[in-house]
Image: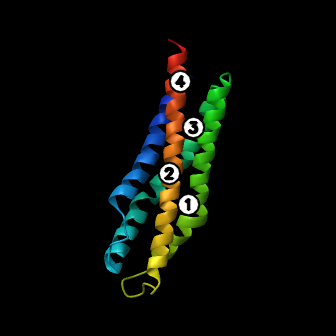
Amino acid sequence: MISSTIRFANIILAALLAGTSFGIWIGFNPLGLSASTYLEQQQNTINSLSVLMTSLVIIATVITIISAFVQKNDKRVFITLLFAAVFFIACILISAIGNRPIDNEVMTWTKGTMPKDWTNFRDKWWSLHIMRTIAELIALILIAWTNVRSKAMYR
């Protein structure tokens, strides 16, 4: 029962994390926005999602590692889940080293104080966001595969 609960939580958390990032990727592409629209959208996104996304990726990473150890008797599942955790850790690093410093900078801007090279910040943030979204999607796929594989084994 505990194993099933952990595996279920793992899928849900990974799906919430990857789904939110994917939604931002598809629905909030900032490349065609004016400076003021970009600033308003980005600051709103940072204020709305920063704590949530940080919490989700940390919890998803921990649950994925726990899930791996709960299923350590199945070496394929164990190793696959450890790889999924590595992809989540990559998201944490991308965010901490790349996106977060840009977020902190953007939060200090006003329409009157945006730097002339604001598009460089935007473009770098966007590229990093796509990278972490792909990493989250890969982790989700690996987690889902381990659950489908485990179910198939018991038939």
Tag 4: amino acid: Arg
Which residue position holds label 3?
63
Seen in the picture, residue 58 relative to 107 is either above or below; the reply is: above
- Which numbered disc, 4 or 1, marks the residue closer to the eye? 4
Looking at the rendered structure, which numbered label has been put on residue 12? none
Residue 15: x and y, percent?
44, 41
Tag 1: amino acid: Ser
Q: Residue furthest top?
A: 155
Tag 3: amino acid: Ile
At numbered mark 1, what does the secondary structure look like: helix, strand or loop? helix
Disc 1 or 3, which lies upstream in sequence? Answer: 3
Which residue position holds label 2?
134
Residue 5, visible in the rendered structure: no
At numbered mark 4, what does the secondary structure look like: helix, strand or loop? helix
- Which numbered disc, 4 or 3, marks the residue closer to the eye? 4
Seen in the picture, residue 107 relative to 45 is either above or below; the reply is: below
Disc 4 to disc 1, C-alpha distance: 31 Å
